[in-house]
Amino acid sequence: MIKDISASIQFIGVDDEDLDLFESQYDVPEGMSYNSYVILDEKIAVLDTADARKGEEWKANLADALGDRQPDFLVVHHMEPDHSALIAWMLETYPGVKLVATAAALKMLPQFFEGIALEGRTLAVKEGDTLGLGSHSLRFLMAPMVHWPEVMVSYEASEKILFSADAFGRFGAMSHTGFLVSEDDDWACEARRYYFNIVGKYGVQVQNLLKKLAALDIAMICPLHGPVLNENLPYHLGLYQTWSSYGVETEGIFVAHASIHGGTAAAAEKLAEILRAKGCPKVSVADITRDDIAECVEDAFRYGKMVLAASSYDGGVFTPMHDFLYRLQAKGYQQRTVGLLENGSWAPSAGRVMKEMLGAMKNVTVVEPMVTIRSRLHTEDIPKLEALADAMLQ
């Protein structure tokens, strides 16, 4: 798919609608896009390549965009294979092309392409460096750990375009999302799931990048995944500000349960009912044994408060809940309030393990009382749920 960004800049990215798991772990029912761009000026710059899965399609798009011209530069914003798989092919196919990347990216290249010949064919750029193309030029801004250490973004001042690498990306092929974000598109839903599961651990680094972007006049953001952003940019930038500072996006409570035979799930649903009756503005409930775990991670960060309800298992906590808490810790879960509900037929242990795992996270407050039920929710347990609901709503 070739699309005009402007008279001089073209999108040459490709859709991958057959991909089942992005990064071998994230469910992508609407596929994925691998975005790439070409700036056609006195000199030609190709901005990133694509995943090998769609290599032939990307090569055809590049050939159509170039016509009878040859590229002068290949700018590599990010070395992850879904954006860089065609680098060696580019160097072999276009003898005059020069590779532009950070020093860290250039150091990584031989790890991905054994025997690649780079002598005299690279240009290492650092913070504030520019690449002149004619009437266009790219200014490079370093963005380490957003979300790999070699990442950079670039800004084209004449058209006020930010090429943002993985920042501001989202799940979904463009055949589903559209090329541009439209007003009726819920961009935030899949962008949030993408952010917290892929970039979320590196909030400080995203904040550092946002401070740099605040000094730029940006009219359009061109990410490496998902649609181009050309309207309502304060909204998108504002979401990234909230997400990267671990702020609360939506007032409410996320209730996540891991139940073996349904007893814990019934207790969690009853708690959600009580929370709603007491005026909680939003209660979201998820079954982490069956629901998309990446969406559960997303909701844990979206809301400022969470209740975890889990069965005891082998003297610990039911494994889906253990896995969920491990993911939260790995993604930097912090600055949240959490309530606990455990179930145990003879020796309840889930609450102890959940509290221990939460204790390893930054600025997470575990509220009292923790509710313990035995096998099934009983009438005498309802006041305990009421008390937990009151504590969560304070």
Image (tube, grey):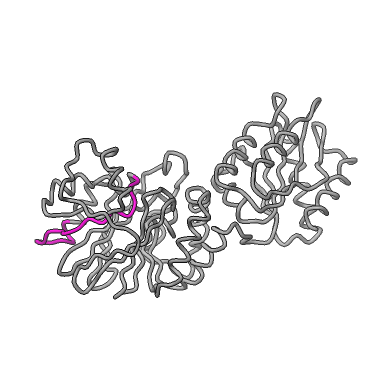
Query: x, y (%) of residue 214?
Result: 46, 70
Magenta stretch in the rendered image = 63-80
Question: Along the line of sight, which residue is nearer the eye, 89 or 361?
Answer: 361
Please indicate whether residue 122 sits to the left or right of residue 275 in the image.
left
Residue at 33% across / 65% down in the picture?
Answer: 128
Q: In the image, is 250 to the left or to the right of 233?
A: right
Q: Quadrant of residue 153?
A: bottom left
Q: Quadrant of the C terminus?
A: bottom right
Q: Position of residue 316 (x, y in %)?
A: 70, 28
Q: Nearer the viewer, residue 106 or 290?
A: 106
Residue 187: give x, y in percent of width and height: 48, 62
Image quadrant occupied by the N terminus: bottom left
Left or right of 283, for residue 178:
left
| Nearer the observer, 76 or 351 | 76
Quadrant hosting residue 176: bottom left
Number of callouts in the render?
0
Q: Residue at x 19, y 58 (%)?
A: 73
Give me the residue at 78% from left, 61% from top.
Answer: 279
Up the image or down, 337 lies above or below 230; here it is above
Instruction: Please tell me whether residue 71 belongs to the stretch shown in magenta.
Output: yes
